[in-house]
Amino acid sequence: MIMSGRNNLLSGEGEDWEEAVLSSMRDAALSDTLVYSILRQIREENKNNGCSENEQEQIQAIEQLQKRLTRTHLSTFGIIEQLYMKEATMCLQIAFPRGIYAAFQHRFGSNKDCTLERLVMESLEDVESMERFPELSKNKTFRNELLDELKAELRPTFRKLLTSYVSAWDERIQGILRYGFRLGYAAAQSIILDVESPQT
């Protein structure tokens, strides 16, 4: 029987294994590969909405910055880029389950609109979020320290290019959060539909 002995799905046995499997599934599904896919989708969205000009200016600024940096500065810049990608992946892994939760709350909860609005609009910059997601906070802090160090060593013209770079990533992160939430919401809706209207 499924509910007996070691197979009891509601028992505490095997929690370490379950956590490891769930973590592995999350990391595999919500990876930097999906981040790149979302970033491509964001670029396509900007193009369709006529907002690609600003993005193109940001890309050109980043290219100019990379051409003018010294080898030492380029090394620091590369670390910053890695930290931004790590942040994007972590934000995706936060936004996706929020979308799932919001969809189930919207379908079965009593205070639907409040939960949905809170999860969509809730900032990851406040103190509570920093405490809830310490790895994200640590990543942001280290990245900002490197940005400040780099900015202090650059000439004013280069600092302006660096500001465009930061703005570009801020917009990307917001897009990652938005698309991650949408994907989680859609995934939960699909589950609800499959369970409530099983294929015959």
Image: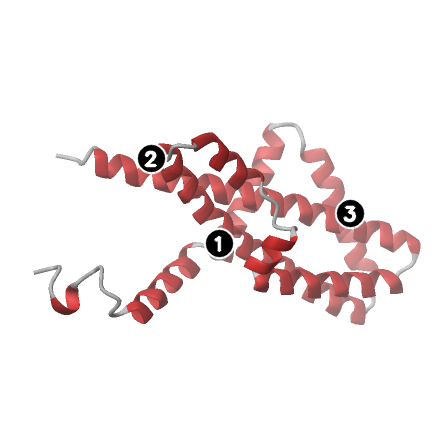
Model colouring: secondary structure
In the displayed structure, would residue 89 be above or below residue 115? Answer: below
Mark earlier in primary sequence (2, 1): 1
Amino acid found under the numbered disc labelled 1: Gln
Instruction: Indicate the amino acid at tag 3.
Output: Ser
The residue beneath circle 3 is: 164
Task: Tell me the kind of residue under disc 2.
Answer: Phe
Q: Percent position (x, y) of residue 165?
A: 75, 50
Q: Nearer the viewer, mark 2 or mark 3?
A: 2
Mark 2 or mark 1: which is in front? 2
Tag 2 secondary structure: helix
Label 2, label 3: how far apart the Cα atoms are? 43 Å
Marks 3/1: CA–CA distance: 26 Å
Q: Is residue 40 above or below residue 142?
A: above
Which residue is drawn at the image coordinates 27% and 34% (left, top)?
Answer: 193
Q: Earlier in the sequence, mark 2 or mark 3?
A: 2
Q: Does any portion of residue 86 appear in the rendered image?
A: no
Give the class, few, some or many, for how many residues have Cα within 10 Å of label 1's Cα (few <14, many ≥20).
many
On the image, which quarter does residue 26 sit in?
Answer: bottom left
Between marks 3 and 1 in the image, the one whose residue lies nearer the viewer: 1
Position of the C terminus, as image quadrant, is top left
Crowding near the residue tagged with mark 3, few <14, some 14–19, many ≥20 C-alpha atoms within 10 Å = many
Tell me: residue 191, above or below residue 2.
above
Instruction: Classify residue 85 as left or right of residue 152.
Output: left
Taking depth in this image into account, of 71 and 171 the one nearest to the observer is: 171
Q: Secondary structure at mark 1?
A: helix
Residue 188 picture location, percent across and down: 35, 41
Residue beneath disc 2: 108
Question: Is residue 162 in view from this perspective?
Answer: yes
